[in-house]
Amino acid sequence: MSEKHLKESFVSNLNGTSIGEISLGLSIAPLCILSRGLIFISLYQKFGKIVYSWKSCLFLDFSLLVLPQVLSCTVLSDFLYLVVGCISVMCVLHLYLIYRNRTLYKNTSLKKICKSFLHARIEDQHVPSVTTFRVLINLFTAISILAVDFPVFPRRYAKTETYGTGIMDLGVACFTFANALVSPEARSPLEETTSAFHRVKKQLFSVWPLVFLGFGRLISVRAIDYHEHVSEYGVHWNFFFTLAFVRVLTSFLLTLIWKQKIWIVATVIICTYQIVLEMTNLKTFILYGSDQSQRHGFLQSNREGIFSVIGYVVIYMFGVQIGSYLLKKRIFVKELLELFIKLIIISIMIFIIMTVVQNYVEPISRRMANLPFCIWAIGQCTGWLSFIYFCDLILVFVQYLLPGSCVPSTWTIGNFTHSHQKKDQRKEMDFCLIHAINRNQLLFFLHSNILTGLVNLKIDTIHSSSCFSLIVLLTYMSVNCLLSYILHVSNITVKLW
């Protein structure tokens, strides 16, 4: 067997892992965000204001945000409960020490502090949790697309063949959901935006980089005879084409729908698609083709990529619905808490529905993007976002206890400090990996893919030892983060549309 076919076989015919393990693994990233924030605040409480250089911030962020994620999906993948437990204990310990050593509210009960905190004002006009959510998806994707080619990455985490749930099955769904959260339709009411024709035309123009990258990937993969898992999208289709088509199709659909009814229409679409899968030969066609072996013609060659667009359109529509609620302006902390509670309730309801659908309809299938897959993806994204939101609320509370402290990528609490001091602190804390990646997210994803290809061309990944694999992965992620950081500190934003 050639090296190309060996690598293709290495990532094929897999069955995934449990949803519980995926949820546990995803919880590590928000906990790392919380731990990083509490460490910054602890240092401020002990030493006062510290001016960090961008190199120091990069080293701290890489050590606290990237390293734990690399380890948790490789050598520590069998000890996730231990990883989550250790980080959680560390967070609780830091939180206790900060609270015990507080100078403000020294003689005030916790109940009164919380009551006062709920009426504190929030200065930010954006939602940091959404930004963090989008960046964490990019980070985890960057780690996974290379790690999956090494034996140190558990096969149960890789994409499943037909049915099942691997953590990499969430990749495109998470990107789709994250893009929807900050889409023009989510950020402003459809009734108040420009004409439907103008919105669709704008989306057609804005997706040209994705189409260009899709063709670029297709040509480069063919030119160097790079290994690929054909049943993932098809022969010619890829991730970039899916994102481009989803954005254009959804933009067109949303011109015909009242904003309050998006979730209803999305539900009708995905239920209809599932009925067609069950009552026709479409399911057999997507999974096996018309002649059970060969891929002839454009439709049959790319059947997975083409038909899965339906499911991703539905995920995008739900993302717009949730995003339009998330991005509403909120003034007081109690409004943020109310939003968090609603997000948790929505997540629980979605997971209950998913369990019922899996038991009585069919299992989850990323390859078809069927009804159970869409419910799972929306529930997993909403739950993950809720946990990030919860960690942000804790950091805001700690900043409230310690006026003058500042944590990167969280809300600014409008209490006790002067506005010009807050602006200075924000400028200093802008040396943040989350801000750096967020500034050029598409570029980060692009150079991650390029570096992944280069590593695979130069290294026999399949037969690499665990130690060597870790060195390669950490070097690769260091380069990715450094590139984004250099652009950020140089105030360079690469935007082609």
Image: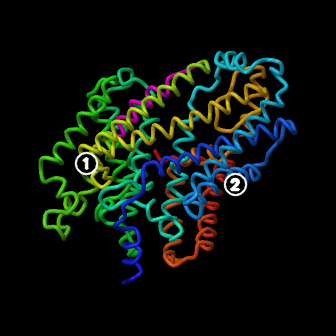
What is the count of numbered marks? 2
In reply to whether residue 316 is colored magenta, the answer given is: yes
Q: Is residue 206 left or right of residue 235?
A: right
**Residue 461 visible, this angle:** yes
> The residue under label 1 is which amino acid type?
Glu
Q: Is residue 302 left or right of residue 68?
A: left
Furthest residue in direction right, as rendered: 47
Closer-to-camera residue (476/148): 148
- Residue 457 horizontal/vertical position (percent): 49, 75
In reply to whether residue 403 is colored magenta, the answer given is: no
Q: Quadrant of the C terminus?
A: top left
> The residue under label 2 is which amino acid type?
Ser
Vertical position of residue 459 compared to residue 354: above or below = below
Q: Residue at x 39, y 47 (%)?
A: 173
Residue 294 occupies quadrant: bottom left
How is the rendered protein coloured?
rainbow
Residue stretch rendered in magenta on the structure: 315-330
Say which residue label 2 marks: 63
Closer-to-camera residue (167/251): 167
Say which residue label 1 marks: 362
Q: Secondary structure at mark 1?
A: loop
Q: Which mark is residue 487?
A: none
Vertical position of residue 198 compared to residue 297: above or below = above
